[in-house]
Amino acid sequence: MTVRLQKFLAEAGVASRRASEEIIQSGRVAVNGQPVRLLGSKVDPVHDQVTLDGKPVRVRRKLYVALHKPAGCVCTRKDEAGRPTVYDLLPREWRNLYSVGRLDYGTEGLLFLTNDGEFALRLTHPRYGVRKRYVAMVDGRIEEPMLKLFTAGVWHQGERLKVERARLVAASQTRSVVELELAEGKNREVRRLFESQGRYVTHLVRTQIGKIKLGELPAGKWRTLTEPEIKTLLTPL
């Protein structure tokens, strides 16, 4: 059975499928000794020899990890500023995994890591609409009209931001707690939503992705996803 080359690379843990397409077009991949730049080219994982920068690429056992990312670390593999990364929290033999989406430095919560590019694509591409749930602590009292504005959509720095659902959990004169559900997840979207209204998020946690909840997993700890959990995440809404 043949598969598209970019899918083969993604399943081998080289990169996500979209990033694998860029790698192919750069001329770094060869099949049976012949450079391949054409997207959509197919390979036989059993009989064809695929190399990247001259080194053999083999399909690895797929891994799916749920991590409670603590605040104060980044999702990149290496940080130029020397800040801790989520990879410092994983076993050394799992350093080939890559994060499924990202949480910013100051945000904590549920983060998946995998070497399965198809899985990563299904959870991050907007067309699949996998929802992510966040709980934000915000300075000052938040009123319902602001939350209705978020569900309708607001503009911030030339980009439209929108939540699928917003619920006021608690509110006082000094701070409020808001639960928000997003289907797309643009860069710093939750924080930017409140910034668009002159408010500041003091604490932010991602509590759920799809049907998988953060639960009691302690900050800085990880667990592997079960087969039923993986199937649930890949099941269309």
Image (cartoon, helix red, strand yellow):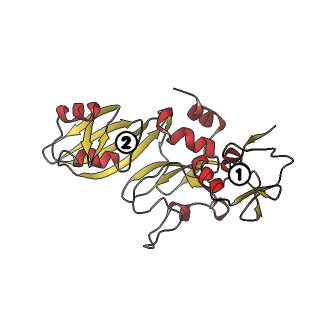
Tell me the mark number nearer the camera, choosing from 2 and 1. Answer: 1
- Toward which corner of the image does residue 29 lie, by quadrant? bottom right
Q: Which mark is residue 134?
A: 2
Foreground residue among 30 and 109: 30
Dot 2: element: strand
- Toward which corner of the image does residue 96 lie, by quadrant? bottom right
Q: Residues within 10 Å of mark 2 (few under 14, many from 20)?
A: many
Residue 15: image location, x then y, percent: 62, 53
Residue appearing at x 45%, y 39% in the figure = 208
Residue appearing at x 57%, y 44% in the figure = 120
Foreground residue among 76 and 71: 76
Dot 1: element: loop
Residue 173: image location, x then y, percent: 12, 44
Residue appearing at x 30%, y 40% in the figure = 160
Residue 196: image location, x then y, percent: 21, 46
Location of mark 1 (residue): 12
Q: Is residue 58 above or below residue 180?
A: below
At label 1, the amino acid type is Ala
At label 2, the amino acid type is Tyr
Residue 227: image location, x then y, percent: 66, 37
Query: For the residues marked 2 and 1, what is the alpha-carbon distance in whole angstroms?
Result: 31 Å
Q: Quadrant of the N terminus?
A: top right
**Most distant residue in the left direction:** 173
Foreground residue among 21 and 135: 21
